[in-house]
Amino acid sequence: MTLCDWPSHLAERAQACRASHLWRHRNTRQPASRRRDFAGNDYLGLSRDPRLAEAMAKGARDYGTGARASHLVNGHLAVHEALEQRLAELTGRPRALLFSTGYMANLGVIQALCDPRTRVFQDRLNHASLLDGARLSGAVSRRFHHRDTADLERLLERSPARHPRLVVSDGVFSMDGDVADIPGLAATARRHAAWLMVDDAHGLGVLGERGDGCVGRAYGIDEVPVLVGTLGKALGTAGAFVAGSEALIEHLIQFARPYTYTTAQPPGVAAASLAALDLLAEEPERRERLHALIARFRTAAERLGLPLVASTTPIQPIVLGDNATTLAWASRLAERGIQVGAIREPTVPRGKARLRITLSAAHADDDLDALIDALAECRDTHAATGEDTAT
Ligand SMILES: *Cc1c(COP(=O)(O)O)cnc(C)c1O
């Protein structure tokens, strides 16, 4: 019997991954990088706002750089409490619960609500953290076709009504930028006494009259009983929250392991999030600027004949199909000083590799022009060498 040795095991996996153009690299960014960033999720340009940095520093001076303990021991600080109240208010829910990251919030909610008796129904394009949460809970998961409530209805009809059922969807889909059919999901879930959970990581701050997201105050807890939002995207800080009824939040405090068994978020981060919520309310022009840029980008990209997705959000993917072409476009853009995400499987389905372009209120008109020019160049170059890359 040959013993499996780890070095050759790793080498084999690496080799297979590189051969399919799926090996990933990190780019180290310098603080004063002059690269044009069309890859991040800083939709309102808040992450570089000096007022947030100042709030973060003050939070650290007032409370310490770390929270020193988990929320249930003695790490739950007044600044966390204040942030939870503001998030509940923003989303029109009785309560909100702060988590250290969105990934943990999603693991925590699904794990706390579900067990092997529960049935979880997920949109096929849901974020990895939602799929992982269902896996952690041991629940039986079903995937419905993207944004297809008729397919969801069919799956719900087939599942035994004696099991508690949870329908889960991204609000704004992170790799496509399109928005879930919230009223359709809510009505379908309600007909089957299922709860609806929406993860609005990319809608919060961007959509809704007050930046309250694609659910926010437009849909109450009867329609969307479980609402997740994250703070590391449009709000420019870090962390996440779950908003809902008193009973839901108390349940999570008791049973969500990713809530219980981790140190509370650093107080400076929570203080910065409070400052970001102030700016969200006081500077609606950031959202207006963002939506004007989205419209300009789409008009220009359509004129170039680029394969856009029907997205009204700052996530504007260009679906190129194969991995090698996607990498070729991304590296040409990088040579022009423009960073975009080159997204491949398993983040998106095989054959749907894409550039994930994201817009931000912090972009200048010049930045957008440079992006469009560089994309035009990619399109022309690709047409010339298409046979080499379109494998
Ligand atoms: C980014 C993201 C998360 C994870 O949030 P983090 O705070 O970065 O861990 C969860 N859900 C969706 C849809 C996301 O895009």
Image (spheres, helix red, strand yellow):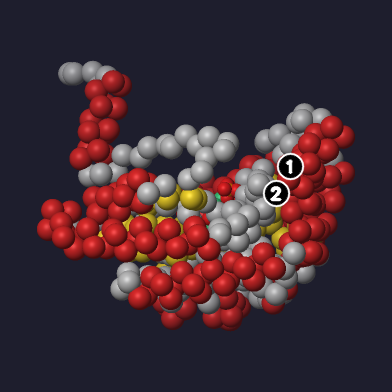
Q: How many marks?
A: 2
Q: What secondary structure is found at the residue carrying circle 1?
A: helix
Direction from residue 287 to residue 27 in the image, left or right? left
Q: In which quarter of the image is residue 192?
A: bottom right
Place residue 353 in its image quadrant. bottom left
User: Nearest the camera: 171 or 140?
Assistant: 171
On the image, the x and y values in percent for residue 88 come to 78, 61
Picture residue at 60% right of the left edge, 61% below the top = 361
* Residue 313 in sight in this render: no
Residue at 32%, 71% in the rendered image: 304
The residue shown at (18%, 18%) is: 2
Q: Which quadrant: the C terminus?
A: bottom left
Q: Position of residue 323 (x, y in %)?
A: 26, 52
Vertical placement of residue 178 versus 38, above or below: below
- At x 83% / y 38%, what residue is drawn? 58
Residue named by callout 2: 49
325, 343: nearer the viewer: 325
Label 1 close to label 2 by CB (< 8 Å): yes
Whole-number angstrom distance, CA of label 1 to CA of label 2: 7 Å
Q: Residue 53 carries which label?
A: 1
266 sits to left or right of 120: right
